[in-house]
Amino acid sequence: MNAPARIEVKPKDYASDQEVRWCPGCGDYAILKAIQKVMPTLGVPRERTVFVSGIGCSSRFPYYMNTYGFHTIHGRAPAIATGVKLANPELDVWVITGDGDGLSIGGNHMLHVLRRNVDLQVLLFNNEIYGLTKGQYSPTSQIGSGSPSTPEGSVDNPLAPCTFALGAGARFVARSIDTSVNHLGEVVSRAHAHKGASFVEIFQNCNVYNDQVFAYFTERNVAADRQVVVCHGEPLRFGAEGEKGLRFNLERFALEVIEPGKNGATDADVLVHDERNQGLAALLAAMKGPDLPVAIGVLYCAPGPEYVSGLYAQREQVQATRAAPDLDAVLRGGHTWTV
């Protein structure tokens, strides 16, 4: 019998027949296009792909993907996605969430899916605001952020998603930007190739309630000086001509910006990125302007034991070493009562 012809799948095949309903100009459009563009390159059939979301603007995502999907409840996408992966490990499971959904009401669930190292991809859209419910401040909103729930400005210390993920024990942590379609695709591909829980923070502009909040490092005229694109094994250099670099200051135990050739700094002083180094990843995740650039790319990648395969292996071992269960013995064992 002849094998069936392999059907070539294109990005447009991942677009559903649903009307995309985000505000005009929202960064979610760019992310959707980037994901639809990268999906055909991953080698996973659409019928084995599942997108799971919670509540929020980002959580409309499963409707717009021509795959399986669940639009679940606020903050619980990681828990439901874990259940999906446990029920059928052959499925390729993606969690789509936002900074509010994933790190406020869903913070506990996010923590556990990362520490367990469940084999799925978490894409967290961070716009530092609650967009769907009309602009309240979120766990990632900066101090001083004005909103309907903080009319005088937020006094909360903001949560840094990648720092949170590293602290929770994530084995893959990365960042990208909504409008950097090619870079975002590369990061998502790396996240998918990782065996275990992958956490990707995507800086996403909310042009209605928090417009240009990331402009200080994403605008084209400043990006070269305010972003450092990290790549394993390559020096941590940035600037229009790569004239700047990051050096580790032993006295302050912190990263600092240098310009090789000036003030005694040399090329040898520039740190080389090692994505297996969790300490370096933590320092990169904590960097923010104006004195330090924002790190973009794969900050940390150190594969470790994966939860679902470990659980299945344990079950098989138990089944192989124990006698077949006797339901009657279970019912009649222990304390019983005669009524």
Image: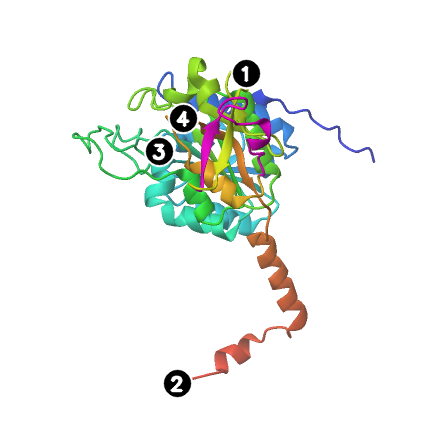
Q: Select label 4 or label 2 by which is in front.
A: 4
Q: Select label 3 or label 2 by which is in front.
A: 3
The disc, 4 or 2, on the residue closer to the chain's N-terminal end is 4
Tell which of 331 and 20 is nearer to you: 20
Residue at x 64%, y 73% (from the top left corner)? 322
Q: Select label 4 or label 3 by which is in front.
A: 4
x%, y% of residue 179?
47, 20
Q: Amino acid at mark 1?
A: Glu
Q: To which quarter of the image does residue 273 belong?
A: top right
Asked if the residue at tag 3 contacts the one at tag 4, i.e. Cβ–Cβ closer than 8 Å, the answer is no
Q: Select label 3 or label 1 by which is in front.
A: 1
x%, y% of residue 205?
38, 23
In screen coordinates, is 323 left or right of 52?
Answer: right
Q: Select label 2 or label 1 by which is in front.
A: 1
Question: In the rendered image, which residue does mark 3 sit on?
Answer: 56
In screen coordinates, is 170 left or right of 91?
Answer: left
Q: To which quarter of the image does residue 57 belong?
A: top left
Q: Secondary structure at mark 1?
A: loop
Residue at x 60%, y 63% (from the top left corner)? 315
Q: CA distance from mark 4 to mark 3?
A: 13 Å
Q: Amino acid at mark 3?
A: Gly
Residue 272 drawn in magenta: yes
Residue interval drawn in magenta? 253-274
Q: CA distance from mark 3 to mark 2?
A: 52 Å
Question: In the rendered image, which residue does mark 2 sit on?
Answer: 337
Crowding around mark 4 (Cα neighbors within 10 Å: few <14, some 14 to 19, many 20+) is many
The disc, 1 or 4, on the residue closer to the chain's N-terminal end is 4
**Farthest-out residue, front:** 264
Q: Amino acid at mark 4?
A: Gln
Question: In the rendered image, which residue does mark 1 sit on?
Answer: 241
